[in-house]
Amino acid sequence: MSDPALARIRTFSRYTWIVGAVGVMVAAFFVVPNITLLGDGVVVAGGNGGYGERINPYYEDDPVELTMADGVIPGDRQGGWMTFDKDSEPLELRRPASHDDTDHYGNDYISVYQTPGAPGEHPARDGLPMLGSLWDSEDVVYATPALTDSRLWFGAIDDEWQVLAEPVRSTAIVDGVAEGSGDEMLSYRGDALSARFTHTGSGYLRVTAFSPEFEYRGEPHVNDVDDFTTRASWPVPGTVLFRIESSGGEWSVTVDE
């Protein structure tokens, strides 16, 4: 092949490479979010959140203290903690319906954790019991107080977010025993760590116990049909919510006090 032909091939290849490189850079400018390096080497993305790693406030040296006003807990991508003292009411946590109408990525959920420790105390960093995650307004996380003061932690990735907190409507268990039929939300407060559940008649009975620092994984503690008796336990004493779902028959709950 002649030298002029080789020169033309080299020139064509060089221009092709340059055009391709410019195209990749332009595409990256529009597609890839701006990346920011925050404290402790945590990488997050610019924009309205939903991309990259989230900051877990529990592992920050100086986490932000959040406050609740008029049933609203506001925060940003730094997340934070709030006091949840032993005399608090159980809380039902949700995202506002307005969040569902916004453009957001698939991982902009809010993680909710609970640890022991009063204000001024930093708990040992040996793991976090996650109460649950809030993706949209249909998700619910139940937070229940322990027998000693604790903290609620919120990990997020949005620049701005809100969590709505309402007291849980429940029927208190009196003298350690409750009986009934159909769906119900029961509450118990004390130092018991287990209970017996009995169902008679046809139909199913599902019971989920929400207790302090309980890591909810979506599975009920009790899930059976027709006549049966079973037991369930929880790890930390305090206020326990029993969400009962029943399609028929009669049920009873006896707390092991």
Image (cartoon, rainbow, N blue to C red):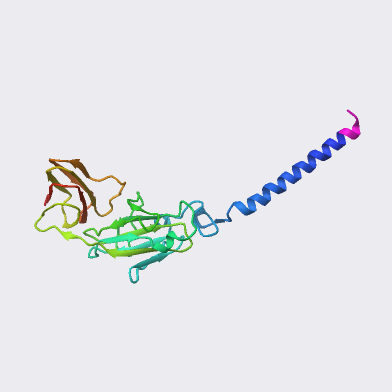
Most extreme residue toward the top, as rendered?
Answer: 1
The residue sitting at 59% across, 51% down in the picture is: 32
Q: Nearer the viewer, residue 145 or 123?
A: 145
In the rendered image, the vertical position of residue 75 relative to residue 105, given as above or below: below
Magenta segment, principal secondary structure?
Answer: helix
| Residue at the limit of the structure toward the left, as seen here | 175
Asked whether, in this view, residue 238 is left or right of residue 30, the answer is left
* Count of residue discs: 0
Q: Is residue 65 magenta?
A: no
Left or right of 247? Residue 151 is: right
Looking at the rendered image, the quarter that the N terminus falls into is: top right
Q: Residue furthest bottom?
A: 70
Residue 123 placed where, x, y %?
A: 33, 56
Task: Please give the name of the residue rendered at 12% of the width and 43% of the height, measured from the top-left corner.
Answer: 201
Asked if residue 193 lies left or right of residue 93, the reply is: left
The x, y position of residue 193, in whole percent, is 18, 50
Query: Which quadrant holds residue 162?
Result: bottom left
Q: Position of residue 230 (x, y in %)?
A: 15, 42
Image height of 160 relative to 130, above or below: below
Figure check: 119 above or below 44: below
Q: Nearer the viewer, residue 128 or 159?
A: 159
Q: Is residue 225 left or right of residue 60?
A: left
- What residue is drawn where x is 28% and y is 53%? 213
> Where in the figure is residue 72, as x and y percent of width and height?
36, 67
- Decide: is 75 above or below 177: below
* Residues shaded magenta: 1-5
Q: Which quarter of the picture shows residue 219?
A: top left
